[in-house]
């Protein structure tokens, strides 16, 4: 067995989180401990020459070498939370979910992987994705590329009632909300930013014939829009005030811009003010039933009244 093969074998043992001891390796390869020390030194030099994020550490207690990384790594605790969040999203197909989880687990040592796998085993077994069944990893990545290069695209899109339409748009942001990925895109025909569910985009094609351009000031800021949009419903921006009898944190978490401007201890309520887009805000406020009383603006109050009356008429 030549030195190169021996060094590769030692490197493979280190990569798979094994502790290596000179004496044991010398017996295995029928060479001297001094020769093994030379192999270890050359592996260490290789890390330095190639600027790899690895280093060899010696554990005096166990009398062996282990591979450590100099790159910032994710902890097993953080990785468990990430996997839990991904599973709860239900956004990916079962195949994509399994590949994603297995890929994430490869970021941590084998011992930590073995600790996490039993914790998520039951949840993985009963994982139930949303019903559209379309793979999304490549689609989201492709759309992100269009956004980065500011490319206009023409899409074939299936609307809510299965109507197939063609739209020429300028993708500007990708947002995940309520089980689905959306692309926020400027539609020149409607002169507005609209939301398209990624799983409903059947085909995309770069459109160099009808390029859409937007100034920096006109572009969508996905961080800002995340604070204003609910249920991926666009609309007009407004400042809404509502009295709330529910769990205050639930309302404040739903509206990141929200703040309590008055407390009404006699009623067990608070007055909350938030900036949001009207359609998504209305959907959430209506879902709270008698726990909410919208107080302003007046036209929004009238809209809420009308919607509640239409709901009553259903009964």
Image (cartoon, rainbow, N blue to C red):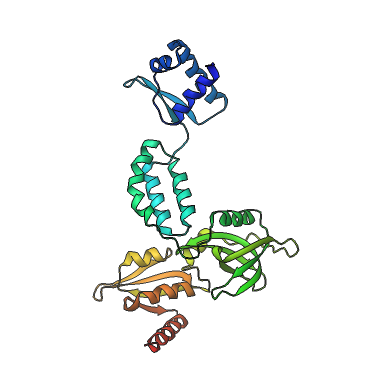
Q: At 40% across and 28% down in the image, what residue appears?
A: 18
Q: Position of residue 264 (x, y in %)?
A: 28, 73
Farthest residue, direction bottom: 313
Work out whether 253 lies above or below 35. Answer: below
Q: Looking at the image, which is closer to me, 87 or 9?
A: 9
Work out whether 147 lies above or below 251. Answer: above
Farthest residue, direction left: 266
Q: At 43% across and 28% down in the image, what residue appears?
A: 67
Using the rendered image of the protein, determine whether residue 221 is visible from the camera's viewpoint: no
Q: Quadrant of residue 199?
A: bottom right
Q: Position of residue 172 (x, y in %)?
A: 60, 60
Farthest residue, direction right: 209
Q: Quadrant of residue 2?
A: top right
Q: Looking at the image, which is closer to me, 140 or 136?
A: 136
Using the rendered image of the protein, determine whether residue 161 is visible from the camera's viewpoint: yes
Q: Position of residue 157 (x, y in %)?
A: 61, 68
Left or right of 263? Residue 25 is right
Work out whether 81 lies above or below 189. Answer: above
Quarter holding the C terminus is bottom left
Work out whether 139 lies above or below 49. Answer: below
Q: At 61% across and 55% down in the image, what residue appears?
A: 142
Q: Position of residue 43 (x, y in %)?
A: 51, 21
Query: Tag count in the figure?
Result: 0
């Amino acid at each position: 067995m030549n030195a190169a093969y021996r060094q590769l074998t030692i490197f493979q043992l280190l990569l798979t989180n094994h502790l290596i001891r000179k004496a044991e390796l010398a017996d295995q390869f029928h060479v001297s401990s001094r020769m093994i020390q030379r192999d270890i030194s050359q592996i260490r030099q290789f890390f330095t020459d190639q600027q790899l994020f690895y280093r060899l550490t010696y554990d005096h207690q166990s009398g062996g070498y282990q591979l450590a990384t100099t790159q910032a790594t994710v902890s097993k605790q953080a990785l468990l939370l990430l996997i839990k969040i991904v599973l709860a999203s239900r956004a990916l197909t079962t195949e994509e979910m399994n590949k994603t989880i297995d890929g994430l687990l490869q970021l941590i040592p084998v011992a930590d992987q073995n600790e996490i796998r039993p914790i998520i085993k039951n949840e993985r077994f009963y994982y139930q994705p949303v019903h559209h069944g379309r793979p999304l990893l490549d689609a989201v990545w492709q759309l992100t590329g269009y956004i980065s290069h500011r490319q206009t695209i023409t899409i074939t899109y299936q609307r809510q009632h299965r109507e197939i339409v063609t739209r020429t748009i300028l993708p500007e942001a990708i947002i995940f909300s309520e089980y689905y990925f959306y692309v926020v895109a400027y539609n020149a025909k409607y002169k507005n930013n609209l939301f398209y569910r990624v799983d409903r985009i059947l085909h995309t094609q770069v459109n160099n014939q009808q390029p859409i351009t937007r100034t920096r000031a006109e572009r969508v800021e996905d961080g800002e829009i995340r604070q204003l949009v609910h249920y991926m419903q666009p609309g007009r921006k407004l400042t809404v005030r509502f009295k709330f009898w529910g769990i205050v944190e639930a309302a404040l978490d739903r509206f990141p811009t929200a703040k309590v401007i008055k407390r009404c201890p006699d009623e067990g309520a608070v007055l909350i003010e938030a900036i949001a887009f009207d359609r998504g805000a209305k959907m959430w406020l209506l879902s709270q039933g008698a726990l909410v009383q919208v107080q302003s603006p007046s036209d929004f109050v009238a809209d809420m009244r009308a919607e509640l009356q239409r709901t009553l008429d259903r009964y």
